[in-house]
Amino acid sequence: MSSYLDMELLRFTTAGSVDDGKSTLIGRLLFDSKSIFEDQMDQVKKTSQKRGLDHTELALLTDGLRDEREQGITIDVAYRYFATPKRKFIIADTPGHIQYTRNMVTGASTANLAVILVDARNGVMEQTCRHSIIASLLQIPHVVVCVNKMDLVDYSEEAFDKVVEEYEAFAAKLDVKDIRFVPISALHGDNVVNRSKNMDWYEGPTLLNTLETIHIGSDENHIDCRFPVQTVIRPHSDEFHDYRGYAGRIAGGVYKPGDEVTVLPSGFQSKIKEITTFDGALEEAFAPMSVTLTLEDDIDVSRGDMIVRTNNQPDMEQDVEFMMCWLHNEPPRPRAKYIVRQTTNEARAMIKDIQYKMDINTLHRIEDDKSIEMNDIARVKIRTTKPLLTDPYRRNRHTGSLILIDEATNDTVAAGMII
Amino acid sequence: MQKYTLKHLQELESESIYVLREVFAQFENPAILFSGGKDSIVLTHLARKAFYPAKIPFPLFHVDTGHNFPETINFRDSLVDKLGVKLIVGSVQKSIDDGRVKEERGINASRNQLQTTTLLDTIEEHQIDCAMGGARRDEEKARAKERFFSHRDDFGQWDPKNQRPELWNLFNGRKVMGEHFRVFPISNWTEMDVWQYILAEKIDIPGLYIAHEREVVWRNDTWIPVSDYINLRDDEEVVKKKVRFRTLGDITITGGVESEADTLEKIVEEVAAARQTERGNRADDKRSETSMEDRKKEGYF
């Protein structure tokens, strides 16, 4: 049991289309790792029978909403949970069809790892490229390419090598630090949880083993100190009469009492007095911990401000360039105003320039057609009413990300990765 | 860099505290939906941590079906006392008396469905713009698609096909008058995480969760506690069993499991070995394959 308390958490995303076996793979992972409960399995068996299937459809384990069950498709991101004695996992299960790019982007935004499925018979397809480009764009640190349906190519090493070669040639254009390959059959369970008896030539770890052991300790930025203030804590009690603390979740770096810090955008300087938590004051705190900081000096700090190390500061700009994924079914209105939310900060913004659209199947730039529709990805420039405190998304996913909200409808209409 | 990593419970805690603080910053009049169950107890504990050394800046909001385990109400009142927070009670009995809803009849009658009206009426009466709940995505398949910040229209309805995309930790709580939000800070926790956390943090919970002797009847494949609110069938036999409850809902529909787990450590072991989901003993979820989705659309928790 103590081992359970010591586990790390891995968040991964899976993207796939109807026929590539994604739901089967997830069903297999959950089933073989004994994460499916009897009553869930009973319900799946019942539904399989009702539909006249002669096998138990593991894919049904992952369908949630009524429409999805009726149509046999996944519409929205669904989150699944399972644990092994080594790690706890959160799967963001997203539909992989092009019209669901926004869901893939959503699922990828919080993932440490992406599982990408390739059909061994077909090799690298358009959708493989699409999923990989999104993983790269969203800076998912690790990609595991599962070469699936190995049973249909006689578990052949040559078939696997061919896919690996094709993928590596394509991935050279991407910005992914860590790519691994596993030959699997989700349907029969080869190399998913249990080692395959049909592929002696493969000496690497199974998919689950990869997920359990991949090093995720350095996925957070522990260099650039970034503390976006969420709210100010003032107890007004006798015991803490003069207490004034700044609550937030560390977005980067390591903070210690005595550190020289600057509050942005004001530029006031001070030192960290205490790192307060319910469990006692801390000697140091790092991303992604939620803590409360107090400062030596009584200066004006409020939500949206950022407490940073004096000698390492983020960009402070009103003109912000980013890769944008448009999420809404209505295109952006010309010269419309949006609310931009970035860390805990909020400003109004206008899209000034659309530089190019990106073909997410090929990475090609489209410069002659700049009309933006849902699921499009484009490089844009906005002008904000006040400076944003940013880092490039490549350097920090917390301070480098933003969303746009339509002022008229309050809908979240776009997501951005700052360049 | 091995030094700078969080264990999974610390990471989940940090995420939930972040969400609670976002609620405080983004809403005017939020409340914590408090059922007396372990999830809302953990949520309340997290709120305490999020705003320390200040008090929890939200009232606790209990939708009281009138069909409670007496232990739950005692626990609620002493917690409210200890934390020094305000308690808001929405009474299903009052909704029935006022003619807002009609009591179900029959052997499986429950007040579960009726709660939705009381919940929405109380939200309106107290102008609550954000009701935080302890619902988790691992509980039920419709909940797997729920956002942290879940928008409700002015009828309190959930539109699962038209949810706002939620990326990174950038939560959009903007709304117009009359609309409100449901926020689920422990979305990413599993039943196991909740128990591990209760154990690690030594959080006080009602004794109902721990194995105890109780009079029960076998109904719908589970041990239903005998109480004033239950209609016994002729063929039903009241027996004394050592049981514990994995969830706490309305006393008329919450089934217990036979258990010897009389300490938190033993409960954790039992949860780890369990082959049934915790909601497997909830009659409200068994009504149809999509009963949770249907209730949620209307405004249920």
Image (cartoon, coloured by chain):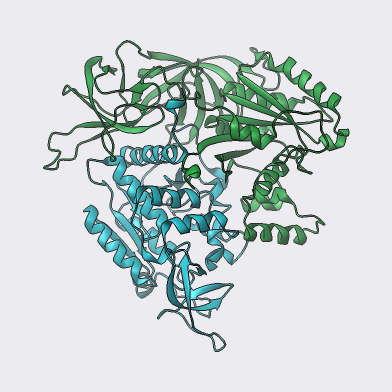
Q: Say above or below: A230 vs B191.
A: above
User: In the image, which lettered chain appears cyan?
Assistant: B
| Quarter location, residue A103 | top right
The quarter of the displayed image where residue A364 is located: top right
Query: Observer-nearest residue: B2 or B86?
Result: B2
Residue A131 image point, x, y percent? 67, 27
Q: How far across and how far down the image is residue B49, in percent?
A: 30, 43
In the rendered image, residue B255, in percent from the top left (x then y), is placed at 50, 70
x%, y% of residue B267? 47, 58
Q: Residue furthest front?
A: A2
Residue at the limit of the structure toward the bottom, as seen here: B234
Question: Left or right of A222: which side holds A265?
Answer: left
Vertical placement of residue B124 versus A361, above or below? below
Q: Nearer the viewer, residue A96 or B69?
A: B69
Q: Is residue A121 left or right of residue A129?
A: right
Residue B13 in view (yes/no): yes
At x 56%, y 76%, the residue is: B219
Residue at the limit of the structure toward the top, as seen here = A311
Q: Relative to B96, is A361 above or below? A: above
Residue B179 visible (yes or no): no
Colour in which chain A is drawn: green
The residue shown at (46%, 22%) is B1
Residue A400 versus residue A7 in the image, above or below: above
Q: Nearer the viewer, residue A223 or A405?
A: A223
Instruction: Tell me if B154 is positioned left or right of A46 in this view.
Output: left
Q: How many marks?
A: 0
Quarter of the image for residue B122 reads bottom left
